Amino acid sequence: MTSTSATAANDQPQTSVALPRIVICYCTQCRWMLRAAYFAQELLSTFGVALGEVCLRPATGGIFTVDIYHPAQDGDKTAEQTQTTRLWDRKVDGGFPGMSTQLIRGKSTVGSQKLPVLEVKELKRRVRDVVEPGRDLGHVDKKKTATNTSDSGNSYEQSKAGDGKGPAQESQRKPDGSTCEDCG
């Protein structure tokens, strides 16, 4: 049985790339899809239609990169005149964008503890510098306070019982219990 339907011209698939285009490439073995989706959602919420599109690209090998494809310096928005800028590379930049620790005060009698928190401030700054250089990001542009910086004496890396594996080097477990060799 065959069915046909008429589609409007704007329902046709796009053949050109909408710029600027952000591509977040993440390791599926390390199970970083949710992290990549979170960063994509934050960028779309902040920049809205200033971004042409945001793409999640699955990969392997412990990779987590964020690239932006944008018009060349001459301002031409055609795909032939596209520049690529690497905004983030987990292996080069030493982890994920904005990994820090924050003091969490719970209602338990155990007390307070420091937990890792993902913030996308630095990634948003880097995107802004390419997409809308003059734009004020509000609270994102405020200076860091001593309570939310990761270079204080009680960082997440140091709280990992001295094993030397912080967020950038932490191996992820596969369903069978083994670890991804490429992540470490």
Image: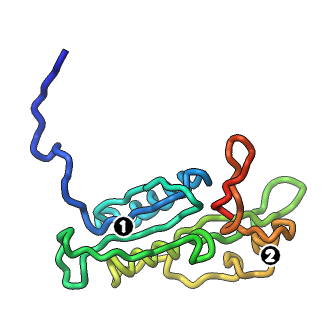
Residue marked by disc 2: 154
Question: Where residue 136 appears, x then y in whole percent?
Answer: 40, 80
In the displayed structure image, the side of residue 179 where residue 71 appears, left or right = left
Label 2 – label 1 distance at C-alpha: 33 Å
Q: Nearer the viewer, residue 109 or 32?
A: 32
Amino acid type assigned to the residue bearing label 2 in the image: Asn
In the rendering, at what x and y percent does residue 95 appear?
62, 71
Q: Where is residue 160, by image quadrant? A: bottom right
Look at the picture and state if 32 lies above or below 86: above
- Amino acid on which the number 1 mark rests in the picture: Phe
Q: Nearer the viewer, residue 91 or 66?
A: 91
- Residue visible at 20% across and 52% down? 14
Q: Quadrant of residue 83?
A: bottom left
Tell me if mark 2 has few (under 14), some (14-19) or many (20+) residues whose alpha carbon lies within 10 angstroms of its own.
some
Q: Quadrant of the N terminus?
A: top left
Contact check, label 2 and label 1, Cβ < 8 Å: no
Determine the residue located farthest toward the top in the rendered image: 1
Percent x, y of residue 176: 71, 41
Residue 47, labelled with which disc?
Answer: 1
- Occupied quadrant, residue 11: top left
